[in-house]
Amino acid sequence: MRGHRRSVALGKAARAQTVLGDNSKGATFDRLKDRVHQTEAVATAEVELLTDDVGEKLTRLDRDAEVDRLLAELKARRSLPT
């Protein structure tokens, strides 16, 4: 449903830009398009936060711990004489 509303809004904005045709209206359209993208990104993030489960969080923590371990290993290698 969200995608439909977004496509309808972008379609109306595109038609309005075509009718108006000057650069100041184009800038207004670009700002509207950016707001739509930002609103969509916020909504997506909120849904992801709401649907995050404990298993996914633990997986991310494990992945972060592995990245930290690999980083420490690389730092240790760099300090060894070549």
Image (cartoon, rainbow, N blue to C red):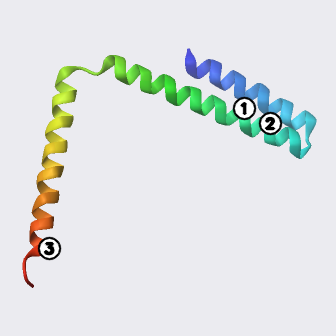
Residue at the image point whose x is 57% and y is 22% from the top: 3
Which residue is outermost to the bottom? 82
Give the residue drawn at x 35%, y 17%.
Answer: 50
Residue of label 1: 32
The answer to whether 2 appears left or right of 28 in the picture is: left
User: Do callouts 2 and 1 mark residues in contact (Cβ within 8 Å)?
Assistant: yes
Q: Quadrant of residue 5?
A: top right
Q: Amino acid at mark 3?
A: Arg
Q: Quick one: which residue is furthest to the top in this view? A: 1
Q: CA distance from mark 1 to mark 3?
A: 49 Å
Classed neighbour count for the residue bearing mark 3: other residues with Cα under 10 Å, few (<14), some (14–19), many (≥20)? few
Q: Dot 3 lies on which element?
A: helix
Q: Quadrant of residue 11?
A: top right
Mark 3 vs 2, N-terminal side: 2
Above or below — where is 16 with respect to 51?
below
Q: CA distance from mark 2 to mark 1?
A: 6 Å
Dot 1: element: helix
Q: Nearer the viewer, residue 9 or 35?
A: 35
Q: Which residue is under mark 3?
A: 78
- Answer left or right for 34 relative to 51: right
The quadrant in which the N terminus is found is top right
Residue 15, given in percent of the width and then of the height, sits at: 83, 31
Please report contact status of discs 1 and 3: CB closer than 8 Å, yes or no: no
Rendered location of residue 29, percent (x, y): 78, 36
In the figure, is residue 79 to the left or right of 38?
left
Image coordinates of residue 16 in percent, x first then y, are: 85, 30
